[in-house]
């Protein structure tokens, strides 16, 4: 049996459509679906099936749009891994909260329900031996810990002005903005590395002290 060119076109469209259903990764799926739509459009036009022609024309537009969305999302993720992230866009969603010098904002192990951006002043994290200043994000790690517990204490070394956001609002923004999500991951990893370095230095100092006592 010899197939005419239009039937070969239809067969190719079917193969491309099958691959779109078979593949599990989104970009190859959308590309295969677009190819299938492009092949089916002239096939159904030749057959005179107007309803199928309209269907695949609309599906092609939809698949092209979804592919563009995926590409845009990937570009944002790549940007988040290479550029410094600004928290300025987060500020309109936050409410002002001021603290007095010496005031304890929270203690290690407390239930966590909000995060802060420091606008003015300095906040100390005694367990980590770290001081945070204007522009720093504080308290976000509790959103990721089991039971939403604070991982460190925080007290005001001076009068402090902050902007506050609840975890509920914080999570909504986290899922809406992939750049923000990656920024948080990078920030948390950097803090873990810094804390590990601090502990390593402390252990080295203690080791030297024991060595001196032993000699």
Image (cartoon, grey):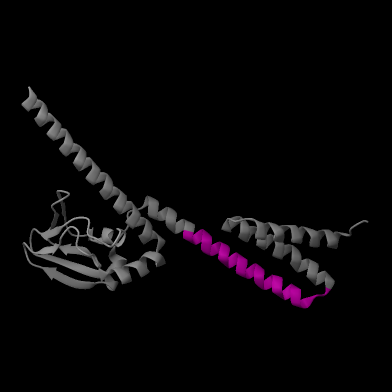
Comparing 191 with 54, the one in front is 191
Seen in the image, is 176 located left or right of residue 86? right
Position in image of residue 7 (x %, y %):
84, 62
Which quarter of the image is occupied by the C terminus? top left
Q: Residue 63 sits in which quadrant?
A: bottom right
Q: Residue at x 13, y 52 (%)?
A: 126
Seen in the image, is 41 located left or right of residue 60? right
Q: Residue furthest top?
A: 215
Q: Is residue 38 above or below residue 131?
A: below
Q: Residue at x 12, y 29 (%)?
A: 208
The answer to whether residue 64 is magenta is yes
Q: Residue furthest bottom?
A: 51
Position in image of residue 33 (x %, y %):
66, 62
Comparing 48 with 192, the one in front is 192
Position in image of residue 174 (x %, y %):
36, 64
The answer to whether residue 105 is magenta is no
Q: Residue at x 11, y 26 (%)?
A: 211
Comparing 27 with 89, the one in front is 27
Q: Main secondary structure of the magenta part?
A: helix
Q: Is residue 144 above or below residue 205?
A: below
Q: Which residues are magenta?
A: 48-73
Q: Residue 53 sits in which quadrant?
A: bottom right
Position in image of residue 51 (x %, y %):
75, 77
Seen in the image, is 213 located left or right of residue 31? left
Comparing 56 with 109, the one in front is 109
Which quarter of the image is occupied by the N terminus? bottom right
Q: Residue at x 6, y 27 (%)?
A: 213
């Amino acid at each position: 049996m010899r197939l005419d060119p239009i039937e070969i076109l239809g067969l190719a469209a079917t193969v491309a459509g099958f691959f779109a259903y078979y593949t599990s990764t989104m970009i190859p799926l959308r590309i295969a679906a677009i190819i299938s739509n492009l092949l089916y459009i002239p096939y159904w036009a030749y057959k005179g099936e107007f309803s199928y022609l309209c269907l695949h024309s609309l599906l092609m537009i939809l698949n092209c749009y979804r592919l563009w969305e995926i590409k845009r999302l990937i570009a944002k993720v790549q940007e988040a891994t290479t550029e410094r992230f600004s928290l300025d866009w987060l500020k309109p969603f936050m409410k002002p909260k001021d603290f007095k010098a010496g005031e304890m904002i929270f203690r290690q192990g407390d239930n966590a329900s909000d995060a802060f951006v420091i606008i003015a002043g300095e906040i100390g994290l005694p367990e980590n031996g770290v001081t945070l200043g204007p522009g720093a994000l504080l308290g976000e790690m509790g959103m990721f810990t089991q039971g939403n517990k604070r991982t460190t204490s925080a007290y005001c070394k001076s009068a402090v002005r902050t902007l506050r956001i609840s975890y509920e609002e914080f999570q909504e923004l986290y899922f809406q903005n992939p750049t923000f999500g990656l920024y948080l991951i990078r920030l948390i990893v950097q803090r873990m590395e810094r804390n590990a370095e601090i502990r390593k230095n402390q252990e080295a100092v203690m080791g030297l002290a024991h060595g001196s006592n032993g000699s």
